C-alpha cells in the first residue's frame, strides 16, 4: 500500500485504482467497474441507477439491501422494497416467484411499477447459502422475461465461486450490475467494486461523487484490494474451519446445520441469553435471522477453532466460563 503508484482518482483516475477496477471487471465478465468505499454504497449506486422514484424492486427476504443498509434503497434510491419468500431453498427465490411478483407491473396508472430484481449470492442472513450457476440463470431468465433489470449483490461472491469451484463470472451471467466486496473474507481493510456496462459505470462515478465516495490517492486502498484478489483461493480454508466448528458444536448438542461457506448459524431457544453466555466465555457472536452467527476468517487457525469449541462447551449452559481473552471467532468479517 505504501509503495502504490497513485493519482487523483476524482480528477484524472488513479493508476492503481484503474488496475484494480480493470481486473475485477474481467473476473466478473463485465465491461467496466468502479471502486466504492463500501458494499452498501456499491449496492445503493446500482439501485439509484436502475430505479425511478416510486418503482418497486424485488429481493429475497432478509437480503442485505432490505435489512442491513438502513433503508437507503427507499430513502435515497426511491425504491419500494418487495421481499420474496425463499421458495427455492434457503436464501433463494424461484423463477415462478419472480414471475408472479412481477406480474401486473404494466397495469393501470395507479399500479406499483416493478422494474428491478436484486439477488444475493451468497445470502448472508440465510447462513451464507450458495446459488449455483444454473439456479442463477433460471431466475435471471424469469426476470428478463418480465422486463426486469437485475442487480447482483455479490459481496460474498468469491465464497460462492470457491465453494462451487467455478470462476466468479459463471455466477454473474445476465446481471446488469454486480457488487463484490474486497474486505470480509478477503481481508482488505476497506473497499468494494460495482461493475456493469460502460454506460452504467460512467453514471456510477457521478453517483459515487454525489454520495461522498470519491477519493484522491485511492491507489493506497486499491493496492490492498489487489492483494485481496490474490488470496481468493484461501477462502476454502475458512470454509473447512466453519465445517469443523459446526461439527464440533453438533457433537456438543448445539443445533447447527452444515455450512456451505464460512458462516455458522446456531438455532437457540434464548437468543439474548446465549449471546451473553458466549460473550462471557470469550467467544463473540452476533444475532442473525433469529440465530447465533459465528464466522471463520483469515485471522483464525485450527487451534482457534478448538479453543472456541472448548470455551462454548455443551449446550447445557457451560458456555458461561469467562477467561478474559479476546474471542477467537469474531463477527467482523463476512
Image (cartoon, rainbow, N blue to C red):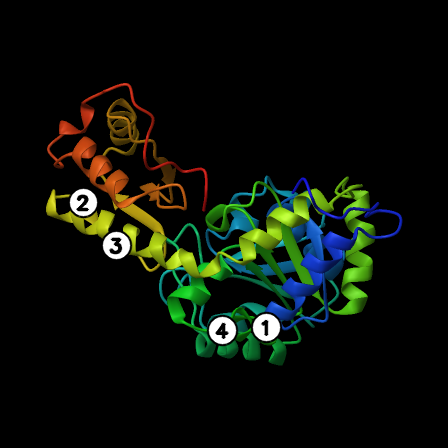
Q: Is residue 146 left or right of residue 83?
A: right
CA gap between label 2 and label 1 equals: 44 Å
For disc 2, the marked residue is 249
Q: Nearer the viewer, mark 1 or mark 3?
A: 3
- Pick the residue in front: 246 or 182: 182
Residue 103 - label: 1
Residue at the image point whose x is 63% and y is 45% from the top: 38
Image coordinates of residue 181 in percent, x first then y, are 57, 52
Distance from label 2 to label 4 (Cα)? 32 Å
- Between discs 3 and 4, the one toward the N terminus: 4
Q: Residue at x 55, y 78 (%)?
A: 142
Residue 285 image position (x, y, % from top left) = 34, 35
- The image quadrant that residue 202 belongs to is bottom right
| Residue occupied by mark 3 | 243
Q: CA distance from mark 2 to mark 3?
A: 10 Å
Mark 3 vs mark 4, foreground winner is: 3
Badge number at residue 260: none
Q: Quadrant of residue 166?
A: bottom left
Q: Quadrant of the N terminus?
A: top right
Give coordinates of residue 7: x percent, y percent: 82, 46
Amino acid at each position: 500500500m505504501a509503495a502504490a503508484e497513485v493519482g487523483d482518482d476524482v480528477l484524472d483516475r488513479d493508476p492503481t485504482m484503474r488496475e484494480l477496477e480493470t481486473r475485477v471487471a474481467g473476473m466478473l465478465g463485465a465491461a467496466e467497474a468502479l471502486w466504492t468505499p463500501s458494499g452498501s454504497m456499491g449496492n445503493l449506486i446500482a439501485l439509484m441507477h436502475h430505479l425511478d422514484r416510486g418503482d418497486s424492486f424485488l429481493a429475497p427476504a432478509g437480503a442485505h439491501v432490505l435489512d442491513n443498509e438502513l433503508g437507503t434503497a427507499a430513502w435515497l434510491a426511491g425504491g419500494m422494497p418487495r421481499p420474496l419468500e425463499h421458495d427455492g431453498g434457503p436464501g433463494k427465490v424461484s423463477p415462478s416467484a419472480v414471475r408472479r411478483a412481477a406480474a401486473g407491473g404494466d397495469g393501470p396508472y395507479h399500479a406499483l411499477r416493478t422494474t428491478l430484481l436484486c439477488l444475493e449470492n451468497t445470502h448472508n442472513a440465510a447462513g451464507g447459502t450458495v446459488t449455483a450457476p444454473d439456479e442463477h440463470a433460471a431466475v435471471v431468465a424469469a426476470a428478463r422475461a418480465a422486463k426486469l433489470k437485475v442487480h447482483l449483490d455479490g459481496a460474498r461472491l468469491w465464497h460462492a465461486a470457491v465453494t462451487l469451484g467455478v470462476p466468479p463470472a459463471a455466477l454473474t451471467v445476465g446481471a446488469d450490475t454486480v457488487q463484490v466486496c474486497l474486505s470480509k473474507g478477503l481481508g482488505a481493510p476497506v473497499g468494494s467494486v460495482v461493475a456493469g456496462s460502460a454506460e452504467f459505470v460512467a453514471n456510477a462515478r457521478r453517483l459515487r461523487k454525489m454520495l461522498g465516495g470519491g477519493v484522491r490517492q485511492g491507489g493506497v486502498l486499491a493496492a490492498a484490494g489487489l492483494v485481496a484478489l490474490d488470496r481468493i483461493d484461501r477462502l476454502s480454508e475458512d470454509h473447512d474451519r466453519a465445517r469443523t466448528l459446526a461439527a464440533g458444536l453438533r457433537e456438543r448438542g448445539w443445533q447447527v446445520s452444515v455450512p456451505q461457506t464460512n458462516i455458522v448459524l446456531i438455532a437457540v431457544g434464548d437468543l439474548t441469553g446465549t449471546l451473553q453466555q458466549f460473550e462471557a466465555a470469550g467467544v463473540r457472536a452476533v444475532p442473525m435471522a433469529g440465530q447465533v452467527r459465528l464466522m471463520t476468517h483469515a485471522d483464525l487457525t485450527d487451534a482457534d477453532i478448538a479453543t472456541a469449541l472448548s470455551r462454548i462447551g455443551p449446550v447445557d449452559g457451560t458456555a458461561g466460563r469467562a477467561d478474559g481473552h479476546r474471542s477467537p471467532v469474531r463477527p467482523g468479517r463476512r
